[in-house]
Amino acid sequence: MISQLLFFIVLVVGFGFFSFNISKIRKNISLGKPLDRSDKKAERIKTTLLVALGQKKMFQRIVPALLHLFIYVAFLFTSTELIEIIADGISGSHRFFLSKLGWVYVLLISTIEVLSALAFISTLYFLVRRNLLQVPRFKMSEMTGWPKLDGNIILYLEIVLLVCVFTMNGADEALFLQGKSHVAGSGSFGFLISSFTAPYFFNYFDVETLIVLERVGWWGHILVVFGFLNYLPYSKHFHIVMAFPNTYFSNLNSKGAFNNLSSVKEEVVKMFDPSFDPYATPAEGEQSVPDRFGAKDVEDLTWKSLMDAYTCTECGRCTSACPASQTGKLLSPRKIIMDTRDRLEEVGANKRINGPDFKDNKSLLGDYITEEEIWACTSCNACVQECPVSIDPLSIIIDLRRYLVMEESKVPSELAGMLTNIENNGAPWQFAQADRKNWVDE
Amino acid sequence: MSKEITKLRVPTVAEMIANNERPDILFWVGCAGSFDDRAKKISKAIVKILNYCNIKFAILGPEESCSGDPAKRAGNEFAFMMQAIQNIELLKGYEIQKIVTGCPHCFNTLKNEYPELGADFEVVHHTQLINQLIREGRLLLKGGGKFDGKKITFHDPCYLGRANDVYEAPREVLEKLDAELVEMKRSKAKGLCCGAGGAQMFKEAEKGSKEINIERTEDAIEVNADYIATGCPFCNTMMTDGIKHFEKEEKVKVLDIAELIANAADL
């Protein structure tokens, strides 16, 4: 009875705190500027199934893709086992579905065991790769401190979880063989791996120890799961949730199409309109000039860019494909996204604590991202192409450039010349427009 | 010899309309194609192909103006919008239905960014048009063994490839040459940028350990290419500079697909 009560408390606190954090993140994302991604629903669902659920883009790199897939599928299957754990936890039963599902249950648990074993091997390899092998994308400056620790914590938790699963099943199998399990009768459950491991690892223990081990495995499993759930919103591992909405709302147009700023369009159209009266009072409801062209801080970015920031799992595929990064420039698309998330967390916390109008005199551009970084971008879209969860670092870079150029007139001097030429003679170089046909006769 | 003397027929839209004619397709030359000495040769190769196939085309000539691409990538939406709105007015006034560009940057901007501002025309890149002309049998490559035993590699322009998913048209064209088409280790969606996009063409690169075009040229040298085929005047400049850096001008030629085809067809 006490354990049922304890379990219930864990359940309520676990889900409650998770929902609280989710609502915080929702609020932060909604600080972004509007952007319409409500169209093409069928295509969006298809993209989500392929890219998020099907992990299509992961398979560009086959070895990490397979290892990642093992952990992912093990996670999905183990989640179904969670249903039983909750049923057992609340009702005080043991292996609630065993008698109801029969051989299907054995098959299901066996599948979970096999996948868990594969996930265990994958996790060990990922730990080695992250800490011992010299994979350049895990060794960059933005991957020190918390991001490095975060990556390892997730893998350690994974190991603990899997050890709990095998301890629980192994000890229970050993008990059942002696007719001492909470399940009536005796024999073997027939689970593929624990029926094999139990005689080797668990036969040396007496019944009391086995009962304790089984309970440690069971409680350990559920506690790690709830710990994990509540660790997610603080971690890069949140991508397991965000990959789905982020892919659903991803850009379905050509990657080369940059958005047109409607506010700028209106201004320019007025300039060319001879009947426009600049001194007339604006008609009611007419949109006036926005507070800011481009983005200086996170609130100037679209909500999709902010969603991108929470989706990133810091894998660094973007940065390893970036031509600027590969040739030693300061730019790292992953850092752009991580900076956006860190700044958004800061802005969100400020607003919660000090009220919605609080300003801390800091900004994304300047305090997090430098001008040198954003000017190193060639807008080649390699980062967008590579991201397995449809993040678009390029749109953030362009929005930051827009602010610098249009609000602060800060632009590398050669580019200032290029822009003046376009304005004066309709070409990036200083050639007369009248000479545009000369090449024909040269 | 005679082909050098053959005068290119390049009417402007204004001239055509004065003769009560309309072009079937507008050739959008672009700033590089109009003013850059190297890119002018690419414009001429495109025109030779259009002339040979008797395509009723015209250019805007002195009425053409920058598409606004470099201004937009550099963050100056005002300069971009000024160009875009004026260009669209002009093209609508001339009732242009179809445009071929000699540059993937113009291609991308006209095709993807102009429609929302009121443009309504079909836009193709010159490699797509050339591919279509070959498929329709209107452009015959005489073979002649000009490229026999040579290796050609195609450098995907970012604004044709990743930006617009055009990977096959340029390759289909190159496969018609009697040469071996070899792929660099990074190609198609994984192709490495030449370093010129996003207005980088007009500025020095940020501080780093290497120039991007050098990194990319190494890819081409690695596969022992005799020709680096390009589809973008800026890529052409960057790759040519890269080859010069390695002092391989004698061994490796950097040519636009239009130039390779015009050459193979004896135009």
Image (cartoon, rainbow, N blue to C red):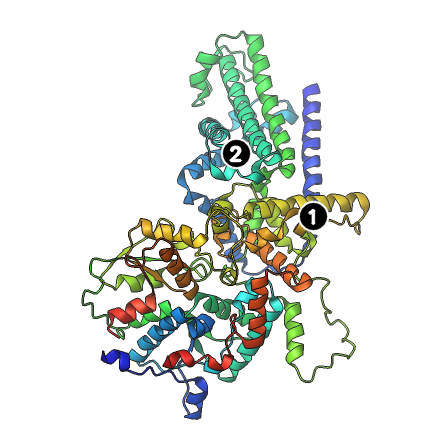
| Marker count (numbered) | 2
Percent coordinates x, y for residue A244 in the rendering? 56, 47
Chain letter for mark 2, please.
A
Q: Is residue A434 above or below residue A213?
A: below
The reply to whether residue A1 is in sight is no
**Quarter of the image where the N terminus of chain A is located:** top right
| The furthest residue to the left | B144
Q: Is residue B131 above or below residue A221?
A: below
Direction from residue B263 to residue A220 in the image, left or right: right
Amino acid at the residue labelled 1: Asn
The reply to whether residue B9 is in sight is yes
For the residue pair A322 and A111, the one nearer the viewer reads as A322
Percent coordinates x, y for residue B59 in the rendering? 43, 80
**Residue that badge 1 annotates:** A28
Direction from residue A279 to residue A57 in the image, left or right: left
Amino acid at the residue labelled 2: Phe
Residue A75: assigned label: 2
The local crowd at label 1, few if under 14, some if 14 to 19, many if 20 or more residues have their Cα within 10 Å, is: many
- Disc 1 is placed on an element classified as helix
